[in-house]
Image (cartoon, coloured by chain):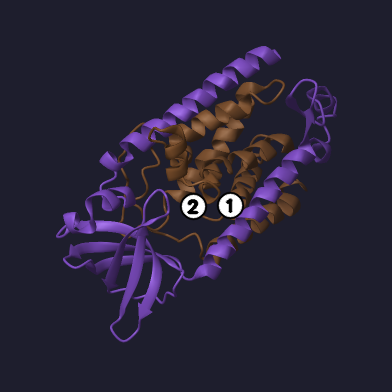
Chain colours: A brown, B purple
Amino acid sequence: MADLLSHVLLVYACCTIASWYRPIPDRWIAVAMIGSILPDLNRITLLVANGTLEATLGIPFNVDAISTLGGSIVLAAIGAMVVRDRHRRTFAALFAGALSHLLVDGVKAYADGAAGAWLYPVTWVRHPTPSLYVSSDPAVLAVAVSVTLLVLAVDRYAIRTQ
Amino acid sequence: MRLARRVAIAAVLLTALGGLCVHYGATYDDNWPHPTGDQIQQEGLESFTGDRVLLFGEVRAVNGDAETITIHVVDDNDEVAAELEVRGVDDQVAPGGVVQVYGVLESGAVMDADRTVVVNRDPSATTYKLVTSVVGLLLAVGYFLQQWRFDVRGLAFEPRISDSELESEPETEPAEVRQRG
């Protein structure tokens, strides 16, 4: 994963660009930003190891399933159930954010040149990755912040003044 | 949607998520093309001698003279499954860092790495990633709570500004419409 701040900023920037073509209320941008967090909920393993969960449940269990296409779809659907109405729109916004996260993660560096199996459960195939970055590289955040500031500047001084 | 129906659907979806985690956990080792920490723990690193493998490991020692590093590969319980000596790590790493190593496993728990990726250069890189991620989490949650509030009685989030209020804004004033919220 890239750091979560980069994911959140990139989703905000993408939503802002999308709003140039069709206005997107801020609240849906906020939901998409929450969506970008969903695939990283597997980091609960920082608190409880997969092995501990398996030993407790007595069956195989791996929360990394959350950080896949299938996990994101189910999590977005669960998220759509905690709003009063507009469930479909909430699902779409959450999933858009989560998909952005998975796509950005899909180009990070792997020493064998193939990305993680994030397309599960559709397929276990690992597509080639250009190995653009590692998550702990501050350059990732620098790019995300730069892109966001550029988009915000264009939005404020070019788009809104039209 | 009525509360009871939302709760019922959420329960079904949570069950599905649990099922996904179980299936993923049960089939991961068979589908991941490289030995996992659990497999190494069970079968021993020697079982994979001669194979070209990708392994993730925490750097335990850096031997500058021999240009090798020693890494620990861990299993799902975060217990050490194997200690491996790796040659050919170009980038500078320090103990406590995390690397990916890809190459042919030689006997005696040695690898001459074809390619390596330094995931975390040292423990400070891990801390950096954690801190920036917490900031990202707070940013997203903070912005969300600025736009939405939680209705305790209805057990649901609802927008702080209703659709009717948004729609009542005059369309002829783009600056107002772009308040969006």
Count the numbered circles shown: 2
**At numbered mark 1, what does the secondary structure look like: helix, strand or loop?**
helix
Report whether residue A147 is seen: no
Q: On the same chain: label 2 and label 1?
A: yes
Amino acid type of the residue tagged 1 in the rendering? Leu
Q: Residues within 10 Å of mark 1 (few under 14, many from 20)?
A: many
Residue A24, percent across and down? 69, 35
In the rendering, which numbered label is found on residue A1? 2
Quadrant containing the C terminus of chain A in the rendered view: top right
Residue B65, percent across and down? 31, 87
Amino acid type of the residue tagged 2 in the rendering? Met
Which image quadrant is residue A97 in? top right
Residue B62, percent across and down? 37, 78
Q: Nearer the viewer, residue B79 or B111?
A: B79
Q: How far, Cα to Cα, is label 2 from label 1?
A: 8 Å
Residue A106, percent across and down? 42, 48
Residue B16 vertical position relative to residue B101 in the rendered view, above or below: above
Residue located at (68% from left, 46% from top): B140
Please state the chain letter of the residue tagged with numbered disc 2 in the rendered image: A
| Extreme residue toward the bottom, this view | B65
Residue located at (63% from left, 60% from top): B131
In the image, taking residue B131 as reference, residue B109 lies left or right, namely left
Please state the chain letter of the residue tagged with numbered disc 1 in the rendered image: A
Q: Nearer the viewer, residue A89 or A15?
A: A89
Report whether residue A156 is seen: yes
**At numbered mark 2, what does the secondary structure look like: helix, strand or loop?**
loop
In the image, taking residue B160 as reference, residue A124 lies left or right, namely left
Q: Nearer the viewer, residue B23 or B135?
A: B23
Q: Are marks 2 and 1 in contact (CB under 8 Å)?
A: yes
In the rendering, which numbered label is found on residue A4? 1
Q: Residues within 10 Å of mark 2 (few under 14, many from 20)?
A: many
